[in-house]
Image (cartoon, rainbow, N blue to C red):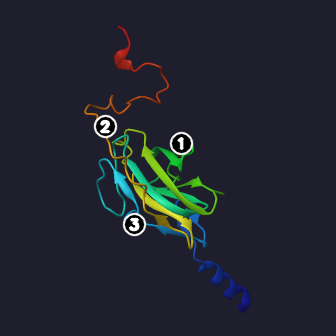
Amino acid sequence: KMRHSLLVLILALLPIQHIGAQSIESDEAIIKPTDKNILYIGRIGGNPERPMFTYPGVQIRSGFTGSSLKMLAKPNSGYFMVQIDDNEAFKVGFCNEKDSIAELASQLPDTRHQVIITYIGEGYERLPEFRGFIVKKGQGLASAAPLPLHKIEFIGNSITCGYGIEADSPTAPYLEET
């Protein structure tokens, strides 16, 4: 009985951190949003430990080493487009109260990679927060690729940012003929 109690105690103390309904495995490490290798582009606000962004097009860029990468965000933060290296971008979502971890990459060659994560929704109702990355222990972030030398600035409103681009209707309500 003593051995059973000791085994239960040891299992309870294993280094697994729970985040919502998901967990961080004992062979993984969390990289905080304040890491010097994370580059933010666009309007970022709030606590540096949990940067918040409410505008579409805000980006998180970084390099990373290893074969996998996960992202932490506040549950119900919305949708992000993710591009790893020069591969086709794909959408990940944090769309309910249990979503806090999204797997961005697995089974990549164990080398250096680049990731670009772009927020694609209006965040004023969701108040999205980036809470860091998860990597395998012994792997980590690397500097982000340099930004392009030339830039284009769009000055406009939410339509300029692509408001309603993922709406169910092919036309926005305010454009319909009356």
Above or below: residue 162 compared with residue 43: above
Residue density around tag 2, few if under 14, some if 14–19, many if 20 or more, within 10 Å: few
Structural distance between the alpha carbons of marks 3 and 2: 27 Å
* Circle 1/circle 2 CB separation < 8 Å: no
Q: Secondary structure at mark 1?
A: loop
Q: Nearer the viewer, mark 3 or mark 2?
A: 2
Kind of residue indicated by mark 1? Ala
Q: Nearer the viewer, mark 1 or mark 2?
A: 2
Counting residues from the start of the chain, the first of labels 1 and 3 encountered is: 3
Q: Position of residue 162 (x, y in %)?
A: 38, 31
Structural distance between the alpha carbons of marks 1 and 3: 24 Å
Kind of residue indicated by mark 3? Asp
The answer to which image quadrant residue 67 occupies is bottom right
In the drawing, does residue 54 fall left or right of residue 118? Answer: left
Image point 73% across, 90% down: which residue? 3
Counting residues from the start of the chain, the first of labels 3 and 2 encountered is: 3
Q: Which residue occupies the extreme left position in the image? A: 155
Q: Which residue occupies the extreme top position in the image? A: 178
Kindly identify which residue carries mark 2. 152
Kindly identify which residue carries mark 3. 35
Counting residues from the start of the chain, the first of labels 1 and 2 encountered is: 1
Q: Position of residue 108 (x, y in %)?
A: 63, 57
Image point 71% across, 92% down: which residue? 2
Kind of residue indicated by mark 2? Ile
Image point 31% across, 47% down: which residue? 42
Q: Secondary structure at mark 3?
A: loop
Q: Position of residue 141 (x, y in %)?
A: 48, 65
Kindly identify which residue carries mark 1. 89
The quadrant of the image that shows the N terminus is bottom right
Instruction: Determine if residue 19 is in view.
Output: no
Structural distance between the alpha carbons of marks 1 and 2: 21 Å
